[in-house]
Image (cartoon, rainbow, N blue to C red):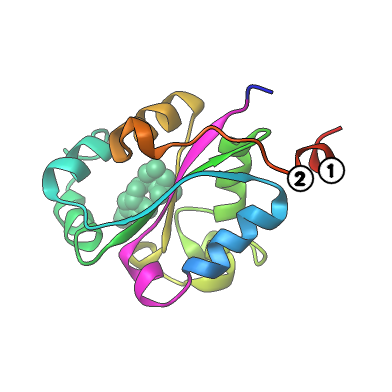
Amino acid sequence: MAMERSYIMIKPDGVQRGLVGKIITRFEERGYKLAGLKLKQADEALLKKHYKDLVDKPFFPKLLAYMISGPVVCMAWEGKDVVAMGRKMLGETNPLASAPGTIRGDFCLEVWRNICHGSDSVENADKEIALWFGEAEVVDHESAMQDWIYE
Ligand code: DAT
Ligand code: MG
């Protein structure tokens, strides 16, 4: 079954606060399949590509400093409607506007400590996965649970 993928990233604060396992668990329990996973220290060049639509914003230097402040966890998650559903699972950009039950709504309070990133379109997801992962790091594989998650 051809399935959509999303690039989900745990930001430096999420890693430092020990929330990696909890965030992975939410995607696993929903039925999504992990296709790529690694810890990485991002640099300025990579972040300028990742946030290419935001580089001219006045807050970009602050965003860069935040995202470079420690390693991030890079993930590619695969499954039905994962891009749109991943955004819903993350919550709003501003954690205080995020409903309880979402990742940001449960684990954080401020926009500059919003712990996670999720692709905002299928097209951007494909670009972000190609940017953060080498080709061999994203793995096609069958989940043993496939037939119990999809009819
Ligand atoms: P999201 O992370 O919800 O996709 P985004 O891609 O628009 O949001 O912005 C990336 C990050 O930049 C976001 O997580 C926090 C910061 N940011 C965005 N818009 C901002 C704003 N208006 N003021 C302060 N920080 C902002
Ligand atoms: Mg975004």
Q: Kindly identify the residue that appears in the image at 49 percent across and 30 percent down.
A: 121
Q: Which residue is mark 1?
A: 148
Q: Kindly identify the residue that appears in the image at 71 percent across and 52 percent down.
A: 30
Question: Mark 2 belongs to which amino acid?
Answer: Met
**Above or below: residue 27 compared with residue 3:** below
**Above or below: residue 121 compared with residue 57:** above
Q: Kindly identify the residue that appears in the image at 63 percent across and 59 percent down.
A: 26
- Between 77 and 86, which is closer to the camera in this rendering? 77
Q: Quadrant of the C terminus?
A: top right
Q: Which residue is mark 2?
A: 145
Q: Are marks 1 and 2 in contact (CB under 8 Å)?
A: yes
Q: Quadrant of the N terminus?
A: top right
- Between 125 and 135, which is closer to the camera in this rendering? 135
Q: Say how many tags the image has.
A: 2
Left or right for 44, reference 30: left
Q: Secondary structure at mark 1?
A: helix
Pinpoint residue 104: horizontal percent, then vertical percent.
Answer: 52, 63
Is residue 143 covered in magenta? no
Q: Secondary structure at mark 2?
A: loop
Q: Quadrant of residue 32?
A: top right
Question: Mark 1 belongs to which amino acid?
Answer: Trp
The boundaries of the magenta stretch are: 3-19
- Between 85 and 27, which is closer to the camera in this rendering? 27
Pinpoint residue 101: horizontal percent, then vertical percent.
Answer: 67, 64
Residue 98 in sight from this viewpoint: no
Mark 1–mark 2 Cα distance, whole angstroms, equals 5 Å
Q: Quadrant of residue 64?
A: bottom left
Q: Quadrant of residue 143?
A: top right
